[in-house]
Amino acid sequence: MTYAYYPGCSLEGSAREYDTATRALMAALDVDLVDIPDWTCCGASAAEAISELLSLALPARNLALAESMDSIRDILVPCSACYLNLKRVDNVIRHDPEQLARINSVLEVDQLMVKGASVPRHLLDILSRDIGSKPIFDRVTRNLGGLRIAPYYGCQCIRPFPVFDDPEAPRSMEPLIEACGATVYPWTVGGRCCGAAHMNTKPDVGTALVSGLLEEARGADAVVTVCPMCQMNLEAYQRRVSRAAGSDLRISILYLPQLLGLAMGLSEKELGLGYNLAITDDFRRKLNGLSPAEERRRA
Amino acid sequence: MSSHDDASVVVDILSGDEELEPVSRLVRACIQCGTCTGSCPNAFAMDRQPRELWRLAVMGQSREIFSSRTFVLCSSCYMCTLRCPRGLELTEAMARLKQIAARKQAPVTRTGNTFYRQFLESVRRHGRVREMEFMTLYFAAMKNPLLPFRFASVGVRLMGKGKLHLQLPQKGRGALDSIFKKVAELEVTG
């Protein structure tokens, strides 16, 4: 299997471990990723707030670049915000010839043209539908039995385009987590918004939303995410959120490919685990062998 | 109120109407059921509920809409769009309101817009956003000496991890200059 790869800006900076882990996991699963040459920013949530045409042209530029890659159709996108931006434009390209012409009149200045020949797909889509849990299960060398993992989907990989999962009650991560031997922590907020950029521009509102999620995660050993913004919101402000909530809400937050990679025997270094901002001592203890209580129960 | 003031109010409302027209069209079929409000994770912080906003849009009440911070609080989670029984593109409508407010430079959008504009400035220059440069531009544009401190703790931790690199804004020819320029041209001509 070969995919075009669109990492997006976050994966070169604050989410570099998501990039590291995605590449390492895919290599371990014998999946080839080819970077889209000279890819540029998708516009994030910024372009949409400022200019409609820019919010179409920036993602379209990358789709046009991907179309020029020989014999590769699908683009693997780990970031949910990038994915939605590319997907929205993909939708416009396929259904709105007038807008398509407008987009191409912008791209023309860079000698580019978009037709709709490539398909942007979220990492979770490819993991859950193209790869599936079996190849992961077959490669597990470190059973994560005893770990309770809360799957956090966020919004933009499941809404508004319900491509690979239920947009209200998503479950696509569950077989993948179970393939690692871990237990899916039952919660109902896996698809509830983390506040996106509110944590930066409206911190009071962002704090309230993140606090609600971390409260719900109490009892899990870790939350896994599939989006750099969700990850940052959940991991980076735990002290502030705990202070505001008046209770200790600290919990480990990992990217999904990091968790899968750990089960498949990849090293913490290969998965960039050192870059995460919230890995608790308790989680590390559990990871580095079963806890004493667990051993007694098993004995 | 003097007749002069009356006239300026009428002009204001009319000019608002015109810009609001695409949004009004998106939500014209709204039946005021409130499913959007009930589904919105940010409704608790809004001064007007999303349901009210759609009614105001249909009525062309530009001034009420843009003096509210409701649309600024939309975090694009698409839950309202998903659940709307009329199938209306409500998240899209919120985005259009943000765009109109950005053009009007409405005070409620100042922080968000400055944040987004500096983000795009970094993208224009390098093709990809450089997080440190973008935050430096943002702090400079906001002219609030206390603002950086709110981000200091996370910033220091990210830098400690080697995830961010100190970078001063660079001037000069940008990687996406031509695309940004063309978009600006087309937006003026419509």
Image: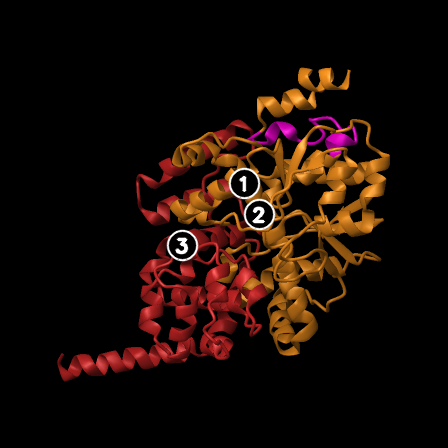
Q: Position of residue A174 (x, y in %)?
A: 72, 44
Q: Amino acid at mark 1?
A: Glu
Expressed as whole percent of the image width and height from the top left, the position of residue A67 reads: 75, 61
Q: Which residue is mark 1?
A: A216
**SS at mark 3?**
helix
Could you give the CA–CA distance between mark 1 and mark 3, rounded to whole angstroms?
Answer: 18 Å
Q: Chain of mark 1?
A: A
Query: What secondary structure is found at the residue carrying circle 1?
Result: helix
Q: Nearer the viewer, residue B102 or A237?
A: A237
Q: Are marks 2 and 1 in contact (CB under 8 Å)?
A: yes
Residue A189 is labelled as: 2
Residues at marks 2 and 3 on the same chain: no
Disc 3 is attached to a residue of which chain? B
Badge 1 crowding class, 10 Å Cα cut-off, few under 14, some 14 to 19, many 20 or more, is: some
Residue pictured at 74% horizontal, 54% vertical: A75
Residue shown at 76% from the left, 43% from the top: A175
Q: Residue furthest left?
A: B2
Which chain hosts label 2? A
Q: Amino acid at mark 3?
A: Phe
- Camera-side residue: A37 or B5? B5
Q: Amino acid at mark 2?
A: Val
**Magenta extent:** A261-278
Give chain B's shade. red
Q: Which mark is residue B44?
A: 3
Mark 2–mark 1 distance (CA, rounded to whole Å): 7 Å
Asked if residue A154 shows in the view, the reply is: yes
Q: Is residue A287 magenta?
A: no
